[in-house]
Amino acid sequence: MDREPAVEQEPSVTTTGWLRRSLNLGKKPAVTTPVNDPAPAMKETQQMSLFDIEQAEGVAQKKTKRPPAGIRFVLNFSDNHSVTVGERPGTIGVKPLVDDDEVFRIYVEDDGDTVAPEHVEFGVEKGVFWVQDVKTVHGTVVEEPGSKPIQCIPYEKYFVVRGSTVRLGSVSFTLN
């Protein structure tokens, strides 16, 4: 039997060809092997067009990523109830006002009548929670751990760190 000697290829060329075929890059199989083929040999491949290569690369790059979890803050109120807030701005007060889908409203109980219907506004800016007094009679005070209490000036934002206490008249909450 006359047999031609096997042509050996460099391992990197063989590996690269296998990798490109696995990722559907560069070449695509010409014909599929029948299931009952007793000795499947290396199949020839066809050249892919530039369109096929770009399409295959696009499929390889598309990964389903979970959206990043939003920032959450827990407001632990002095009457032992907690409210979890996200990045949507809101207000804290005593009387139910007309609900607005764009503003998150938190209602608190105040028997001493020291909390206004809309006492304080809050929100998140660059991942930091802030509060803003809306010119109330009894005011708003921010107490950071290890610092002196700060009386809020109406309509000025005060950035609050976790662990701080915010007092609205006789009601308070701790930011966690």
Image (cartoon, rainbow, N blue to C red):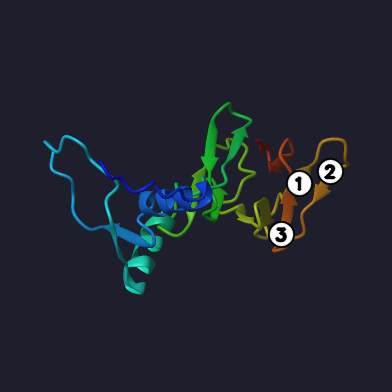
Count of marks placed on residues: 3
What residue appears at the point 45 percent right and 49 percent down from the top-left corner? Answer: 14
- In this figure, which residue is indicated by the disc labeled 1? 141
Residue 87 in picture, x, y percent from top left: 55, 52
* Sequence-earlier tag: 3 or 1: 1
The quadrant of the rendering that contains the C terminus is top right
Answer few, some or many: residues within 10 Å of disc 3's Cα (few below 14, many 20 plus, some between 14 and 19). some
Residue 95 in the image: above or below residue 51: above
Pair 3/1: label in front: 3
**Disc number placed over residue 157 in the picture, else none:** 3
* Sequence-earlier tag: 2 or 1: 1
- In this figure, which residue is indicated by the disc labeled 2? 149
Give the residue at the far top of this rendering: 80
Q: Nearer the viewer, residue 79 or 21?
A: 21
Q: Are marks 2 and 1 in contact (CB under 8 Å)?
A: yes
Residue 113 in picture, x, y percent from top left: 61, 42
Pair 2/3: label in front: 3
What residue appears at the point 49 percent right and 53 percent down from the top-left corner? Answer: 13
Q: CA distance from mark 2 to mark 1?
A: 6 Å
Q: Are marks 3 and 1 in contact (CB under 8 Å)?
A: no
Label 1: element kind: strand
Residue 97 in picture, x, y percent from top left: 44, 54
Is residue 95 visible to us here? no
Label 2: element kind: loop
